[in-house]
Image (cartoon, grey):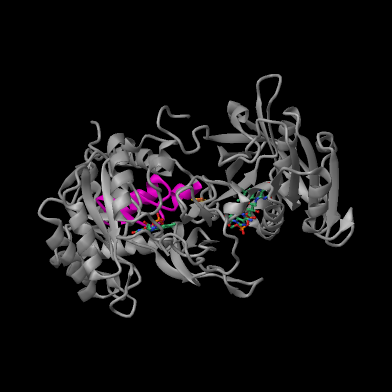
Amino acid sequence: MSLDFSTSLAGRRFPNPIFTASGCAGSGKELSQFFDLTDLGAIVTKSIMIKPRSGRATPRMAETPSGMLNSIGLQGPGIDLFLENDIPWLRDQGARIIVSIAGETVEDYAVLARKLRHVSGISALEVNISCPNVENRGQVFACDPATAADAISTVRRNIGGELPIIAKLSPDVTDIVSIATSVVSAGADGLALINTLLGMVIDTSSMRPKLSQKTGGLSGPAIRPVAVRAIYQVHAALPKVPILGMGGVACGRDALELVLAGASAVSVGTATFGDPTASIRVKNELEVLCEQRGFNSFSDLVGYAHRAEDANEHE
Amino acid sequence: MAREGWAMINPKAEQITSEILSNKKVGSYNHMVFAVTDLAAHARPGNFVAIAVGGPASSMVLRRAFAIYRSSIRADGQGLLELVVAASGAGSTWLTSQKVGDTVDLIAPLGTSFGIPTEPVRSLLIGGGYGSAPLFALAETLKARGCRVDMVLGASTAAKIYAPLEGKRSVSSLTITTDDGSAGVQGRVSDVIPRIIKDNDVEIIYSCGPMAMLEAITKIADSFDVLHQCSVEESMACGIGVCMTCVLPVLQDDGTIRMTRTCIDGPVMDGSKVTWTTSREIPEGVWGK
Ligand SMILES: Cc1cc2nc3c(=O)[nH]c(=O)nc-3n(C[C@H](O)[C@H](O)[C@H](O)COP(=O)(O)OP(=O)(O)OC[C@H]3O[C@@H](n4cnc5c(N)ncnc54)[C@H](O)[C@@H]3O)c2cc1C
Ligand SMILES: Cc1cc2nc3c(=O)[nH]c(=O)nc-3n(C[C@H](O)[C@H](O)[C@H](O)COP(=O)(O)O)c2cc1C
Ligand code: FES
């Protein structure tokens, strides 16, 4: 019996459940030297803002045990050049595209959504709300249920009917389920879990923070248990809401762990820095693991770790 | 796996499992030879490799970048890449401790290479520490084009000067500087290069080494109105253009200064186009600040 490895996320079907993670795959061109982008379920683009952004000063990076800190600061060309260059190129490759957007104000999200609503060839929007809200003392949108919902409902209103929206949440919150519930009522069709965790490294030679911004986002295998926990909690509370899982996935086994917790698809981020073909390897390994466990359909594995203790084992 | 057509970023790059054929201590460095495919035929002076470190269960998740010291195809068709590696932190120390016969995951050739003039010119090559690594192959290429090649190598101390005997043959003069005076002239490369530029009527400078050295050379090159191609060294996480950690402010053809990835638009760059800064802030005037 051959495995149906396709997945459905926020009402769209993808031929397989392994995607790139936003900000970890460049424009797609850089990786296309190493594999065919259409071999992945989808390419998630780097979060794009309205205007060109220089990003933060270097050092922007520090390696940490089984992970790294980054403070890239959303460097990018701005939405207009992005739509002119990146999207047509990805479309020409035949890649399935999920566009990630980020804003500094609620109005930014509205503008971005309007710019994207008539663009063809996009499968979904990922809304990165782990950004400081300049109108609210720099408080991160994703850290408060009300502002998180504001950003998402604004996108919902401005995007029109068609395009599914996936709200990407920060794990740096007291109660991720309340944020998830809030953005789903605001119109999110799916959730992306998790963004990086805030961390800091101090250089003991210079005796000051290693990164120019002092703090940075922690990613890589070090955060995987946090991702598994967040996905598990949210899937338990909102079992019908599809989840795009990410956080420290470096092999098929890691991806399976997120799927069992409740992810319908999995993004591979930091692992790509250590191995350009990591996402393809994860995909192939996951497929084998699903088959080995005797499943006919990938979707049957989604959230499988939640079954009751006394439930019948899968045969 | 060079994919056809539009692929423009690192079109010759391959990811391979590579066996270590030799690993010898030379002064403060390890000279290491790796068995590779015929990718060795595509490597140009200035290109670099990105190596995964620490083995399969490593907690070091990022690649390490090393300049290609030499690339060649042996008589039996075996491709070879040679590197000069300084053990600094955990990853490079792991690499230098690998034995002959061990394998590593390696991606090469990556990045830009030194531009080679079509006419014979008078060139000056300047290396700081292991920054001399890519300069010997460059010297040979320039010599073969009929160029005059003078070389200056600097380091803190004699053991950190990497200058193999065979490398010296392709240069007209070699000047060594050390901070502690343990070899050559006591002082820095910037102390000796103005005189060499004047004496030899140098037309182009090629350099590789620490960023502060490259900045100092840029000032001198600009004051003499001499072209300056430098191989920069920013902290890199991926080496292939996907992480955006390795950026420098660089003047573009359209007149804007943009934070530019040194792994794909470098490491070799036009020194006069780089905004050198140590301030840990984005300089004024950078696109999108
Ligand atoms: C284009 C280029 C060419 C280089 N050529 C050589 C060479 O020929 N010989 C040589 O000995 N070294 C070379 N280096 C420097 C070498 O990459 C670093 O010494 C090495 O990455 C340090 O790794 P580590 O694990 O020892 O240190 P760690 O500090 O543990 O490294 C942690 C992380 O920071 C990055 N990093 C740390 N220092 C540097 C650095 N100086 N440059 C870039 N990334 C860094 C590493 O890649 C890694 O991702 C080169 C660097 C670049 C960018
Ligand atoms: C260098 C870097 C840049 C990132 N940029 C973005 C971004 O632009 N937008 C976003 O939503 N997430 C961004 N992320 C977060 C990742 O998409 C992902 O959520 C996180 O890194 C966890 O996955 P991983 O451990 O597989 O990397 C970035 C992560 C890294 C390491
Ligand atoms: S090192 Fe990753 S983009 Fe240059």
Q: Can see residue A314? A: no
Along the line of sight, which residue is nearer the eye, A276 or B163? B163
Q: Residue furthest bottom?
A: A137
Residue A273 image point, x, y percent? 48, 49
Residue at point 78%, 36% (across, down): B148
- The magenta segment is A245-274
The mark total stands at 0
Residue at point 52%, 34% (across, down): B14
Quadrant holding the C terminus of chain B: bottom left
Indicate yes or no whether the magenta region holds residue A164.
no
Residue at point 59%, 47% (across, down): B269
Q: Residue furthest left?
A: A161
Residue B137 image point, x, y percent? 72, 35
Indicate yes or no whether the magenta region holds residue A261.
yes
Residue at point 26%, 56% (across, down): A126
Residue B194 image point, x, y percent? 79, 54
Q: Can see residue B31? A: yes
Residue A92 image point, x, y percent? 29, 35
The image shows residue B263, relative to residue A235, as above or below, that is: above
Quarter of the figure with residue B43: top right
* Side of B26 where A205 appears, left or right: left
Quarter of the figure with residue B168: top right
Along the line of sight, which residue is nearer the eye, A237 or B132? B132
* Side of B13 where B224 appears, left or right: right
* Side of A288 where A118 appears, left or right: left
